[in-house]
Image (cartoon, grey):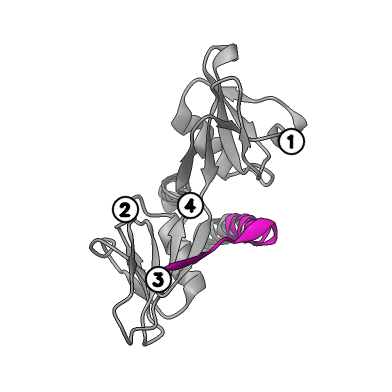
Amino acid sequence: VVSTQSTGSSGINAEYGKQWYQRRVRGLYFTLLYFTLLYLYSSEMRFIVVLASVFAVAMCGFNYCLQADSSLPGYSGDKRRAFSDKQAAMDACTGIMDCNGITLEPAWGNQWTLRMGPEVKKSPRKETSYTICKFCRFKNASLSGPLSAGKNNYTTLEKAKHQCLYRKDCQGVTESDFREFTLRSGSEIKESVKRRQETSWKLC
């Protein structure tokens, strides 16, 4: 029998804290990369370095999970910031420390606002939210479907989760008997074959 273990409130906070840490590390990494390249290259190359750094930062982002008929409490930064475009709101949220998702407000002309969360609440106003995805753990189970495109196996769970959050085709991670963590594109949870001690983490 496939058993599921919810992350619980402490687990959810741990996941969001981990994602906040990853965002901060990513920002520091690109900042250091930028100034290192700026120092190494001649003045003629600096303009190209700036463009490359900006492009690299823009290409990074988290997966967002749909939360129908729901809202996230609290505006990020205790200030209402609204966007008419969903992707623009997601991009803005990714770079803000206390932003854990976005909520569509029909009462305000279908504007997307940056929310603090991280808890998700039922909305009586037909609001829709997207949260930065977290993982739910399933024992003795594997995720269906082919492997995620590109490099798809890692030696640690943290690296595998980190990569999965950045890929549009990744639905979760499955650990094999050999302590290998593979990125999976299928979202269906299946019971592991006998004698295989698999554990899976699905975006939820």
Secondary structure of the residue carrying numbered label 3: loop
Residue type highlighted by circle 3:
Val
Which residue corresponds to the image point at 61% horizontal and 44% vertical from the top-left? 100
Contact, mark 2 vs mark 1 (Cβ under 8 Å): no
Kindly identify which residue carries mark 3: 1
- Say if 131 sits above or below 17 in the image: above
Contact, mark 1 vs mark 3 (Cβ under 8 Å): no
Discs 2/4, front: 4
- Who comes first in sequence, dot 1 or dot 3? 3
Discs 2/1, front: 2
Secondary structure of the residue carrying numbered label 2: loop
Residue type highlighted by circle 2:
Asp
Kindly identify which residue carries mark 2: 169
Residue type highlighted by circle 1:
Gly
Residue 3 lies in the magenta stretch:
yes
The answer to whether residue 43 is seen in the rendering is yes
Secondary structure of the residue carrying numbered label 4: loop
Kindly identify which residue carries mark 1: 77
Circle 1 crowding by C-alpha within 10 Å: few under 14, some 14–19, many from 20: some
Residue type highlighted by circle 4:
Cys
Kindly identify which residue carries mark 4: 204
